[in-house]
């Protein structure tokens, strides 16, 4: 009992939390000035619609920031953070996206909303500053349901015969009532590439052995968060761009509460379980943080299966020759698909001198790496030349190239302190349909998303970047994506400095039309481009003098605005 210090109060519904109306409402309701949106947003869901900072401006396409799926009225006045269950569970990652003008996407990836009411279990689930103060059940609880209060941390590529368990039956405190739960439904939401690819990269099983007959459950389902549902939850909704795997009528009793989700990619995932018990419908969510050490670059694209798009990670230290993509440097600066690559295990590349990782870092559920190959650093997990767009199983046979249309990934588990790299994407070839392709790239630092840029239907970014011209190596369109610098402390990666690479004079067909390279911060180089300083070679700086950046050929640009050749 008692008056909670942070009751849930929602600002009037709006599509723009930075239109001053929301801030006026927050100010009159006693919210601290430090939590006002202004023009860039405050990182909170002030109108309680499941979106954060929608309509608010941001500076750099692809950059990310922390976000919370609670209104600012529920933030501690001293720490400016949510309280109770929401302190960690409602925290997610918000990306800056757009075309000519950039806005926060509104999608707080990996965050869970607070519950409308406290439950009979221990914990402040409605995040109002008091626990056990349910305004619907009071102190007379016929059923005690305690939802998860901490996130689960897992590694990618679990053993195929030992997929980790989430046991929702344990959410029911009275063991004698667990068998009475009926109509279990499970919904799992993933990352950005799960909205881009034909089918999600994760899967749902009813037992630990993923290879057992009939073990795989559920299917691709568009969903939306419905705050008006009782209780509020993610529900299937045709035509929505947010994609999940959902299994309705999964089972009853204790067996219905046991589910085994499998993940092969880093990121934050939401596992939602719902069931009926007595006369009530209960919903709980479990956050799963999938974390791989080091640096991970992830590429997916809308035309996978028809276009061969290649991911590149090039080092910016340790060589004395001309720096560039592909085989520009004889000492192999670039990790990609080729035998001239710095990936030491693909077709004979010598690597960059980093130690191998343990087998579990790259082998397991959905991995395409064979048992005879070491977990080298850096390494390309998969070269997606072609695939079957109808294949729904991420573990489907197909060797290194794969039958399943998954992303391309390059990993470096153990960078040295201050090591710096640049990420790029090449349109290598077209085998069917239109040659046009729209890619998306995520960069992860110790499993945390630090860059999310490019095509993403879930956030409404569906125009750019556009790769139009295919061509082997230096002749195809090439997107210079971002730089990433490692900071290592005590032998472990502690943080990363990241920056996307803008164009000084955007190519409207490929970059969009942001004046002066602001806004969309994209740089797609092309020999077919009509802009000044069109792409002539794969060196980072043109060999002609004067060149596009006013730099000596072969040098590494010192600032992001010097990378783009147009």
Image (spheres, helix red, strand yellow):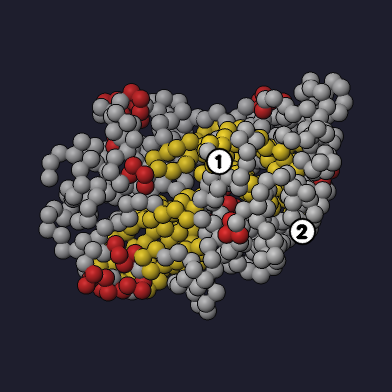
Residue 410, compared with residue 487, is above or below; it is below
Quarter of the rendering occupied by the C terminus: top right
Disc 2 residue crowd, few under 14, some 14–19, many 20+, Cα 10 Å: few
Look at mark 1 in the image and give the residue it sits on.
Answer: 491
Query: Which disc, if any, is residue 106?
Result: none
Determine the secondary structure under disc 1: loop
In the displayed structure, 212 sits above or below 265; it is below
Q: Nearer the viewer, mark 1 or mark 2?
A: 1
Residue 430 % position (x, y): 78, 54
- In the image, 541 versus 152, the foreground residue is 152
Residue 363 figure quarter: bottom right
Percent x, y of residue 414: 61, 45
Question: Is residue 530 in view from this perspective?
Answer: no
Q: Residue at x 77, y 23 (%)?
A: 549
Q: Return the residue nearer the eye: 69 or 223.
A: 69
Q: Position of residue 211 (x, y in %)?
A: 55, 74
Q: From the viewer's perspective, is 157 left or right of 474?
A: left
Q: Residue at x 47, y 56 (%)?
A: 154
Left or right: residue 547 compared with residue 243:
right
User: Who's the residue at 40% across and 71% down the image?
Assistant: 250
Label disc, if present, on residue 432 of the rendered structure: 2
Q: Quadrant of residue 532?
A: top right
Disc 1 or 2, which lies upstream in sequence?
2
The image shows residue 281, relative to residue 322, as above or below, that is: below
Real-space CA distance between mark 1 and mark 2, rounded to the nearest whole angstrom: 47 Å
């Amino acid at each position: 009992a008692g008056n909670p210090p942070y009751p849930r109060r929602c600002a009037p519904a709006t599509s723009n939390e930075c239109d001053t109306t929301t801030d006026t409402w927050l100010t009159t309701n006693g919210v601290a000035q430090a939590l006002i949106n202004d023009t860039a947003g405050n990182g909170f869901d002030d109108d309680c619609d499941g979106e954060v900072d929608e309509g608010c401006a941001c500076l750099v396409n692809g950059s990310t920031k922390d976000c919370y799926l609670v209104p600012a009225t529920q933030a501690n006045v001293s720490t400016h953070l949510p309280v109770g269950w929401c302190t960690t569970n409602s925290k997610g990652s918000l990306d800056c996206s757009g075309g000519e003008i950039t806005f926060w996407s509104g999608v707080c990836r990996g965050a869970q909303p607070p519950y409308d009411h406290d439950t009979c279990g221990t914990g402040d689930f409605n995040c109002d500053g008091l626990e056990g103060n349910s305004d619907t059940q009071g102190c007379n609880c016929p059923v005690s349901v305690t939802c998860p209060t901490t996130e689960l941390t897992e590694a990618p590529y679990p053993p195929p015969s030992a997929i980790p368990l989430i046991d929702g039956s344990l959410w029911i405190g009275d063991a004698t009532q667990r068998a009475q739960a009926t109509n279990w439904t499970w919904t799992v939401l993933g990352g950005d590439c799960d909205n881009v690819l034909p089918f999600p990269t994760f899967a749902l099983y009813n037992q630990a052995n993923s290879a057992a007959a009939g073990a795989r459950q559920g299917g691709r389902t568009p969903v939306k968060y419905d705050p008006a549902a009782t209780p509020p939850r993610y529900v299937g909704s045709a035509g929505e761009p947010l994609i999940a795997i959902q299994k309705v009528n999964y089972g009853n009793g204790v067996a219905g509460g046991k589910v085994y989700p499998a993940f092969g990619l880093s990121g934050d995932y939401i596992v939602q379980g719902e069931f009926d018990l007595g006369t009530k419908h209960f919903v709980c969510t479990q956050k799963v943080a999938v974390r791989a050490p080091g640096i991970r670059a992830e590429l997916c694209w809308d035309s996978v299966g028809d276009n061969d798009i290649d991911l590149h990670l090039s080092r910016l230290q340790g060589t004395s020759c001309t720096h560039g993509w592909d085989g520009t440097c004889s000492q192999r600066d670039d990790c990609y698909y080729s035998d001239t690559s710095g990936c030491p295990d693909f077709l004979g590349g010598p690597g960059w001198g980093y130690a191998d990782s343990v087998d579990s870092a790259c082998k397991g559920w959905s991995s395409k790496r064979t048992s005879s190959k070491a977990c080298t650093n850096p390494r390309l997990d998969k070269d997606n030349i072609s695939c079957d767009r109808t294949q729904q199983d991420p573990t489907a046979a197909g060797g290194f190239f794969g039958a399943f249309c998954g992303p391309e990934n390059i990993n470096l588990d153990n960078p040295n302190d201050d090591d710096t790299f640049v990420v790029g994407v090449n349109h290598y070839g077209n085998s069917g349909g239109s040659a046009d392709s729209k890619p998306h790239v995520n960069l992860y630092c110790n499993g945390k998303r630090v860059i999310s840029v490019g095509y993403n239907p879930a956030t409404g970014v569906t125009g750019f970047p556009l790769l139009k011209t295919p061509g082997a190596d230096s002749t195809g369109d090439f997107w210079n994506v971002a730089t990433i610098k490692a900071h290592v402390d005590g032998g472990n990666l502690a943080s990363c400095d990241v920056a996307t690479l803008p164009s000084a004079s955007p190519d409207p067909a490929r970059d969009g039309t942001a004046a002066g390279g602001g806004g969309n911060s994209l740089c797609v180089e092309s020999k077919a481009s009509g802009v000044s300083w069109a792409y002539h070679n794969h060196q980072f700086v043109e060999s002609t003098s004067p060149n596009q950046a006013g730099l000596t050929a072969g040098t590494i640009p010192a600032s992001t605005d010097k990378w783009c050749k147009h």
